[in-house]
């Protein structure tokens, strides 16, 4: 019996194999796929010039284009995972005896063998870093042990797209404000004996970053919790990080700042003008560069985008777009017929577009009229994510018997740190 696999299924298999292969093998596959893409694209363009529509060639081109994207994404993910292991916030660390003892108390509480007073007493006696005074308000729950907190944070670094590129900062307060110097210092020329009147001083303005509470509520039966063979901490972490990553992915890109972070794309001139004066960013809106077409990307528009940042702001700059947008970008050429997009030529290095690094950032919109499908700049300098230290958990054994609910929360904030480090690329003539 023959089993037929769809093109989408083949791409999924290809991506899975690419992730499992070493960087050198993926690089070889990527180079071969890109050469096939260029040949198929040339065939399509020849058909357009000859004024006939070759459906087979068009389908072949899209299939190869998707394969190139899958291979490049697999290579990028390998580099991200390596960076997270070596330099991430959860880099390997040895648990102290106090941490280990508290983790045991944590496990006993989750299983219902001790009450929350025992957990609080353990934190006070053992002095672990997951104490209430640091991690969470006294709200009837408890703060997860540091190893569990670290595990979730590690996973979020790998899964949440913005956490891979933006700067992440831990805070212990209810929010975070930054003081900005918006200029205003004056000067003047004087003679040797001329009077020197007082000049205007710089103006300072604070800006409060938007915070919200992100939550997940996995459930388990009493029988499962009573099974000592189950690693409760690992199970909870896997349940929580999936939901946290999904919610964060939306908020960090398009969040409106109401009980959630203000997203990366919510700082254009229209959004800033709509806010009350006290809530506008002191440094103004993010500048935009138009594509030059009403509903498409253009080679000239992308060149204008990558040259729009001042030289002193281009350090660490890169282009960011979702996978569908990169499919369109890969077809663009310069005036000499050279493709603007080039795949990675070395493990650990990203693909480039016109010499600039390019990264996939899921959550950005597709190419459409008036959309912002591409962002260019240094996201580590431009956007900041704030994590309230510690994850709070409430154990609810009564609402949905025989299930035990674990209401897990973490306060997260975010917003543009400095809009001068990035540019929007808006689809407009």
Image: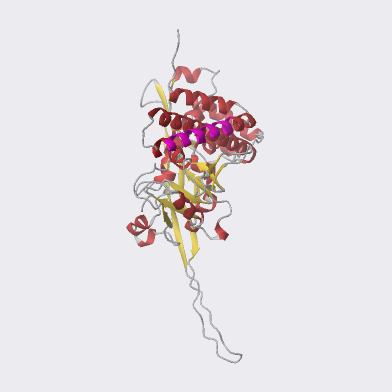
Q: Position of residue 139 (x, y in %)?
A: 44, 40
Q: Position of residue 108 (x, y in %)?
A: 53, 25
Quadrant location of the N terminus in the rendered image: top left
Q: Taking 378 as reference, is 51 above or below it?
A: above
Main SS of residues in magenta: helix
Occupied quadrant, residue 368: top left
Q: Position of residue 281 (x, y in %)?
A: 42, 59
- In magenta segment, residue 36: yes
The colour scheme of the drawn protein is secondary structure
Occupied quadrant, residue 324: top left
Residue in view at x 57 percent, y 32 percent: 30
Q: Nearer the viewer, residue 356 or 73?
A: 356
- In the image as oriented, which residue stretches furthest toward the bottom? 193
Residue 135 visible: no
Using residue 310 as the reference point, say whether residue 348 is left or right of it: right
Q: Nearer the viewer, residue 319 or 93?
A: 319
- In magenta segment, residue 47: no
Q: Nearer the viewer, residue 76 or 216?
A: 76
Instruction: Find the magenta span and give its range.
Output: 29-46
Residue in view at x 53 percent, y 51 percent: 378
């Amino acid at each position: 019996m023959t089993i037929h696999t769809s093109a989408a299924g083949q791409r999924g298999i290809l991506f899975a194999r690419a992730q499992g292969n070493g960087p050198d093998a993926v690089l070889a596959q990527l180079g071969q796929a890109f050469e096939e893409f260029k040949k198929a694209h040339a065939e399509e363009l020849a058909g357009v010039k000859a004024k006939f529509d070759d459906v087979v060639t068009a389908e072949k081109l899209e299939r190869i284009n998707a394969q190139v994207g899958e291979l490049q994404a697999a290579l990028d993910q390998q580099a991200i995972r390596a960076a997270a292991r070596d330099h991430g916030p959860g880099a390997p660390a040895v648990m102290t005896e106090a941490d280990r003892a508290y983790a045991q108390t944590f496990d006993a509480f989750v299983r219902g063998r001790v009450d929350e007073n025992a957990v609080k007493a353990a934190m006070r006696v053992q002095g672990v870093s997951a104490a209430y005074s640091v991690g969470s308000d006294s709200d009837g729950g408890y703060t997860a042990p540091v190893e569990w907190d670290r595990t979730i944070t590690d996973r979020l670094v790998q899964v949440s797209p913005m956490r891979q590129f933006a700067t992440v900062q831990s805070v212990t307060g209810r929010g975070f404000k930054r003081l900005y110097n918006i200029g205003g210092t004056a000067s003047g020329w004087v003679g040797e004996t001329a009077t020197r009147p007082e000049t205007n001083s710089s103006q300072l303005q604070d800006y409060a970053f938007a915070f919200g509470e992100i939550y997940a509520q996995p459930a388990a039966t009493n029988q499962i919790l009573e099974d000592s063979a189950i690693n409760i901490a690992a199970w909870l972490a896997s349940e929580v990080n999936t939901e946290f990553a999904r919610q964060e992915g939306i908020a960090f890109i398009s969040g409106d700042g109401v009980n959630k972070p203000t997203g990366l794309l919510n700082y254009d001139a229209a959004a800033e003008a709509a806010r009350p004066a006290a809530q506008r960013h002191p440094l103004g809106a993010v500048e935009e560069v138009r594509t030059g077409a009403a509903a498409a990307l253009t080679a000239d528009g992308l060149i204008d985008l990558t040259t729009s940042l001042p030289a002193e702001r281009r350090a660490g700059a890169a282009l960011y777009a979702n996978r569908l947008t990169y499919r369109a970008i890969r077809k663009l050429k310069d005036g000499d017929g050279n493709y603007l997009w080039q795949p990675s030529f070395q493990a650990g290095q990203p693909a480039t577009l016109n010499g600039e690094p390019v990264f996939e950032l899921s959550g950005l919109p597709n190419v459409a009229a008036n959309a912002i499908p591409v962002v260019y700049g240094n996201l580590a300098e431009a956007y900041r994510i704030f994590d309230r230290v510690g994850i709070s958990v409430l154990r609810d054994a009564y609402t949905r018997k025989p299930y035990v609910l674990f209401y897990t929360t973490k306060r997260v904030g975010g917003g543009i740190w400095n809009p001068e480090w990035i540019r929007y690329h808006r689809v407009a003539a």
